[in-house]
Image (spheres, helix red, strand yellow):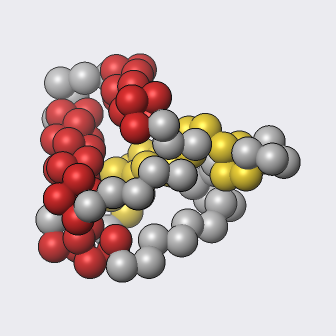
Amino acid sequence: MPSYTRREWLNLTAAAAVGAHSFRLGRTGSDDLDAWIEGVMRARKLPGLSAAIVKKGSVVWSHGYGWANIARRTPMNPDRSLQNIASVSKTVTAT
């Protein structure tokens, strides 16, 4: 599992925010957003992630990508997969 510096996490978070903003504004379709996220996952060798777009306190879109557990081949699910975000949440909140 790769480790990231705080700056790399900020860059990934900012890129995700831009992609989500474009999706929300109708500038891209969900297929484009899926392709972008899957491309980032391949480039960063991420086994799995969940993403969501929240608007006015409500989740308007969410999706799981890859694996929550590679050995058991459990797919990532935004509703059921637990996320260990640790101190990364400070960076995401600040962004």
Front residue of 58/89: it is 89
State the image coordinates of residue 5 (x, y, percent, origin top left): 26, 61
Q: Quadrant of residue 59?
A: bottom left
Which residue does the image show at 48% across and 37% down from the upper left?
A: 45
Q: How many numbered marks appear?
A: 0
Front residue of 14/51: it is 14
Q: Is residue 24 visible?
A: no
Which quadrant is the C terminus positioned in?
bottom left
State the image coordinates of residue 86 (x, y, percent, origin top left): 44, 78
Q: Quadrant of residue 16?
A: top left
State the image coordinates of residue 35 (x, y, percent, origin top left): 40, 22
**Does 51 appear above or below 31?**
below
Which residue does the image show at 18% across and 49% down from the upper left?
A: 11
Residue located farthest toward the right when viewing the structure as drawn: 72
Which residue does the image show at 81% across and 47% down from the upper left?
A: 71
State the image coordinates of residue 25 (x, y, percent, origin top left): 17, 35
**Does 82 appear above or below 1?**
below
Q: Is residue 29 visible?
A: yes
* Residue 82 shown left or right of residue 72 in the figure: left
Which residue does the image show at 34% across and 26% down from the upper left?
A: 36
* Residue 7 shown left or right of residue 43 in the figure: left
* Residue 62 shown left or right of residue 28 in the figure: right
